Image: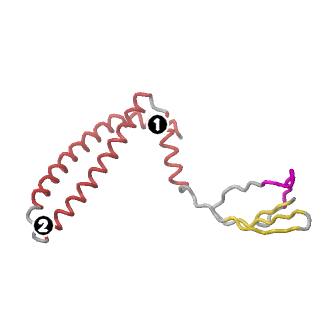
């Protein structure tokens, strides 16, 4: 049995017990496969596979992992905790923004009860800014270690 992918050189695959298997790597483009076994010929098309992520995104993520692994266990834990805190703050910010937009729309429509919501969300936003400032201070403390780790990640 022979097969040919996208007009490249034909390859041979052994038939075992009347069956065979070929493996095609996933590609970001369509692949045309011609299979011949004796007098039988078939051509099939393998659809393209979407990229999991762009090279730039992959490179950034990979370098971040290398940088973190170069840190001490204590600093790795601190970085992980800071990332979790940053994600939580981002989520809280989105919730405050949504609540403020909703309350502003109600206020614009004449619903004065929304002023209490605006006041409460403004207080939450102030607390969120304070938390973000503390997070930035903690990140600044880790910056020298991260810079050192970045130097070792190349």
Q: Quadrant of residue 137?
A: top left
> Which of 18/132 is in front?
18
Which numbered tag is attached to residue 3? Answer: none
Question: Of all residues shown, which one is farthest toward the left?
Answer: 112
Label 2 Cα neighbours within 10 Å, binned few <14 / some 14-19 / many ≥20: some
- What segment is highlighted magenta in the picture? 10-21
**In the rendered structure, which disc, 1 or 2, sits on the residue that comes first in sequence?**
1
> Which of 27/117 is in front?
117
List the residue tagged with mark 2. 107
| Residue in the picture at 36% in, 37% down | 81
Does the magenta portion include 14?
yes
Q: CA distance from mark 1 to mark 2?
A: 47 Å
Does the magenta portion include 103?
no
Q: Position of residue 2 (x, y in %)?
A: 86, 60
Say which quadrant the N terminus sits in: bottom right
Q: Is residue 67 above or below residue 61?
A: above
């Amino acid at each position: 049995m022979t097969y040919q992918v996208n007009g490249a050189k034909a390859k041979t695959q052994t038939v075992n017990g009347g069956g065979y298997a070929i493996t095609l790597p996933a590609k970001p483009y369509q692949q045309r496969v011609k299979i011949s076994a004796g007098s039988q010929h078939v051509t099939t098309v393998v659809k393209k596979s979407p990229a999991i992520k762009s090279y730039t995104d992959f490179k950034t993520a990979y370098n971040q992992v290398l940088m973190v692994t170069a840190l001490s266990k204590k600093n790795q834990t601190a970085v992980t905790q800071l990332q979790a805190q940053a994600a939580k703050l981002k989520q809280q910010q989105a919730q405050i923004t949504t609540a403020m937009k909703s309350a502003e729309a109600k206020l614009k429509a004449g619903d004065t009860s929304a002023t209490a919501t605006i006041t409460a969300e403004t207080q939450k936003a102030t607390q969120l800014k304070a938390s973000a400032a503390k997070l930035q201070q903690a990140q600044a403390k880790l910056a020298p270690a991260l810079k050192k780790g970045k130097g070792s990640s190349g």
